[in-house]
Image: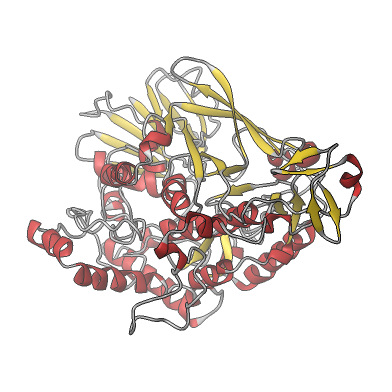
Amino acid sequence: MTRHGGLLTPSTEAESVNDFEIDDAEQSSPFYMTQAPYDPHRAVKVIIVGAGIGGIAASCLLPAKVPNLEYVVFERNDTVGGTWALNTYPGVRCDVPSHVYQLTFAPNPRWSEYYAPGHEIREYYEKVVKDFGVGEHLRLRHEVLRAEWNEALSHWEVTVQDLVTGDVFVETAEFFISAQGRLNVPKKPYIPGLETEFEGHVCHTAEWDDSYNFSGKKIAIVGNGASGQQLLVNILPQVDHIDHYARSKQWILPTFSSGFLEAKADLPGAYVFTEREKERFASDPPAYLDFRRDLERSLHDAYHGSIAGTAENEAARQRCVDAMLKRLGGDDQWLKRLLPDYAVGCKRPTPSPGYLEALRGSQVTYIDSGISHATRTGLVAVDGKERSVDAIILATGFENGFLPLFPTIGKGGLDLAKHWSEDGPAGYPETYFGIMAPDMPNHFAVLQAQSYAAGGTVPLHCETSVTFIAKAMRKIQREGYKALYPSQEATADFNEYVGAYHEDKVIGDSCNSWLKAGKGKSRPLVGWPGTGHHRINICRDPRWEDFVFERSEPGRRNRYEYFGNGWTQREKEADPVALTSYLHPAGSIDLATLHETWNE
């Protein structure tokens, strides 16, 4: 065909393009219109790494939010659940109420306790995977070794190893989501002689050995964070004695919110729900929703207490002091020994029922002088005293999990882990909204640095990130782009704001915390610069002006070529409901959302 006054007419020497023919001279014309209808849902694929809470949230939500999506999930462990699959030590449980530590779209009315044990949380996420059909897309015992953006083909090439067979293969997709989380690589302190001299049992709480018998043994627990506190209380009845090595001091709260039930040593779950109560929640969704809302509201009250020097933070401190003194039986000397010198909230506090009470008992020796080295039979403290033990348990948490666990290569060979490392060009995980990064096309993260907000829960923050990701994916899908990523300028501005926001927050106090890069006023790593509701509202409508967009094939000469032939796929399929989806029953029309639903 040839063009005359904007019309296409038959030609004898021609090339077929979308059922129309254009001659060679025609190729240099400014634009020719394709003859396919506009279809906002071209087929796309995403690779998700990690099947913890973030990966599961993405696997459930994205297929509903991004039509015509193919996805695969790679998980190196043999089950899903992330940190709840890794941590199986005695006493592990959630320290926020079970009914808020769940995905909002998959409420479970049958939690057994107010604070659920770890195995029940893992089982909940296993059930979510089954209920939402994620299993057929899930590849357990598959470890990602490398991910690299192929500029020429506009897709990610992900090298994966099957840990069962040893086979290595490459999977490709337009989009890549890192849901590796933060709590995945156990942090093991260097103790001279621990690996070469000590002849007893050694394990980390994240690599628990169920076969070891603690009965009547002398045990050393190194670390006094949440895992060390929970473990001590739960194995104490079995053992002969515990040497508890505590490097730092911790704030011990009764609960995270004054609206929550307080757990006790003999009732660590705070409350056991009866079958009748569980059945009521299951059979009366409005009543269950009211119960959940009461709990959720309590989580949004913590913001003012995060500002240094405020009456709210001082009140939180006094509440902690009073509660600790009470649990220490009014012993001022013990309180003085344990009381932190930093503000409440500088590092994550812990409720840990029964822990303070146990420290004062004759079965526990509390050692805060540090560890010098290990011997054949035990540990030598900095004070020079050797204490013999049968086993050493490392309750020392996890490495900083914000850096990629494998080479992740973007545009121009940018290696994200090296770029973000302490001695790299950025020096810290420099994210855009805790979700993306410059020069990393179509690369997203769930629960990355700056994605946690004061208020709300981890599952809710995951859902917020995934919803943002879905909008970015649909933008690419429907408008003919091949890739997008945030500009360096926008990312720098966001991180400048993060720093300014945290200037007057308690995180800048003298503590050493995984919430930030180091001690004192170092770079905040975890926190969003605002409340949970603030993050939800900001992320609701992406700022497309902050992004660099890359167009599809270079041969395309008009940004609106994706308009197609002026018709839509919906009209071609002629489904009567789809054609009139903008109509709603009388009396149920919400003017605020009318004509604003993306899939209407």
Identify the residue shown where x is 43% and y is 18%: 164
- Depicted 152 relative to depicted 312: above or below: above
The quadrant holding residue 577 is: bottom left
Along the viewing direction, whichever of 550 and 241 lies nearer the viewer:
550
Residue 145 image position (x, y, % from top left): 60, 27
- Depicted 581 relative to depicted 229: above or below: below
The quadrant holding residue 529 is: bottom right
Mark yes or no: residue 485 visible: yes
Residue 426 image position (x, y, % from top left): 76, 49
Residue 449 image position (x, y, % from top left): 59, 53
Identify the residue shown where x is 25% and y is 45%: 120
Residue 165 image position (x, y, % from top left): 46, 14
Along the viewing direction, whichever of 74 and 173 lies nearer the viewer:
173
How many numbered callouts?
0
Describe residue 22's horizontal placement relative to residue 39 as left or right. right
The quadrant holding residue 504 is: bottom right
Colour mapping used in the image: secondary structure
Mark yes or no: residue 522 visible: no
- Depicted 222 relative to depicted 451: above or below: above
- Depicted 82 relative to depicted 353: above or below: above
Along the viewing direction, whichever of 546 and 4 lies nearer the viewer:
4
Describe residue 435's horizontal placement relative to residue 107 as left or right. right
Along the viewing direction, whichever of 492 and 578 lies nearer the viewer:
578
Describe residue 168's horizontal placement relative to residue 423 as left or right. left
